[in-house]
Image (cartoon, helix red, strand yellow):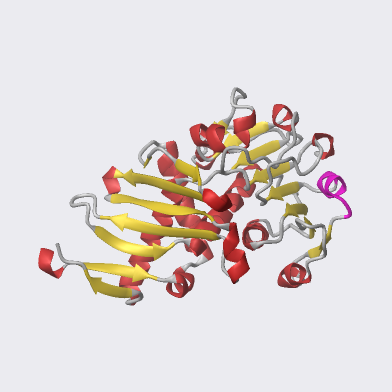
Amino acid sequence: MRSNARLLLLDRDQVAALLHPDAVLDAVREAFLLHQQRAGRIFPLVREALPGGAVFGIKAGDVPTQGLLGYKAAGFWPANRNAGGDAHQATILLHDPATGRPQCLIDGNAVTTERTAAAGALGLQALARADASRLCVFGTGVQARAQLDYALRALPGLRQVRYLASDARRDSAFEAAFAQRCDIAPGVSADAAVADSDIVITTTPSKTPLFAADAVQPGTHLNAVGADTRGKRELPPRLLERAHLWADDLAQARQVGELQWAPALPAEEIGALLAQAGQRPAHDSITIFDMTGLALQDLTVARMLYRRAVTEGAGSSIAWPW
């Protein structure tokens, strides 16, 4: 009944309690497969600079056959750090596609972090060498922690982790978070850490390359996470030309990802590998997964949270008559 309609709200803490890594992995895998099958649609990306150095974006999409429709409004407000807050802010809204009415409003910060890390883990499982044991990560922030956590879950053979903090300092808290799971220490230098790694993960907001192309050895896999806006760049010139390139969405990656710097290069979408429709590169190939984030990832994870919340009686339901 329209007069009895309600809207479910899931705040930060409620979302955190409902986010289970295995369920997130399953939801993100489904998103990539839906995209590969073109059963899920991705609407045009909004990504715009705001005064004061902030960035605002909207990622929207739907899966018509599943009754899934919604969007995430998100961005980056660096000044939030001065107030002790998270610079990344995101809000997700699921709609009933039959009526357009909102179904569930979700704090999207943790969803963004977890779904991105899950995508990275799927990329590692699909493209990294099975014997990979050494990993290098650029950044020690929220996304770097999440990427490393999911990487260690996905590849139990990982033993050594070298990290590069943004200001070249030792990050004791970052080390402590993983000290029981791997040999973790700061890299001596960016190039040395990359050269000594089987896997490289970049999670920074950089607009300039983080290391030299020649440092990347044959057989290395790279998850490029940070470039998600025009002008961002973490990988060096000439590296993409040497590598087998993969993206979550080719059109989007060529617009705002690492592929914006070489949009004419041949590349494939990761969904083909997950659907076993693509060919895994040779053992000694350099592979790159350009991760710009899909609206479908946000929507499949949000739907999982919505269903869990309804089943478990979580969240706050408010009247929303129409």
Of all residues, the one furthest to the top in this rendering is 264
Asked which quadrant contains residue 222, the reply is top right
Above or below, 142 against 298 in this view is below
Residue at the spot 74% in from the left edge and 57% down from the top edge: 158
Image coordinates for residue 40, horizontal then vertical, percent: 36, 41
Image coordinates for residue 190, horizontal then vertical, percent: 83, 48
Of all residues, the one furthest to the front in this rendering is 51
- Quadrant where the C terminus is found in the figure: bottom left
Residue at the spot 70% in from the left edge and 33% down from the top edge: 282
Our reading of the magenta stretch's main secondary structure is helix
Residue at the spot 80% in from the left edge and 42% down from the top edge: 211
In the image, taking residue 195 as reference, residue 147 lies left or right, namely: left
Q: How many marks?
A: 0
Asked which quadrant contains residue 43, the reply is top left
- Quadrant where the N terminus is found in the figure: bottom left
Q: Is residue 311 magenta?
A: no
Residue at the spot 52% in from the left edge and 42% down from the top edge: 274
In the image, taking residue 292 as reference, residue 39 lies left or right, namely: left
Image coordinates for residue 70, horizontal then vertical, percent: 33, 51
Q: Is residue 54 visible?
A: no
Q: Is residue 89 visible?
A: yes
In the image, taking residue 214 as reference, residue 54 lies left or right, namely: left
Image coordinates for residue 161, horizontal then vertical, percent: 78, 58
From the viewer's side, name the closer residue of 246 and 128.
246
Q: Is residue 190 magenta?
A: yes
Above or below, 83 against 155 in this view is below
In magenta, the rendered stretch is: 188-195
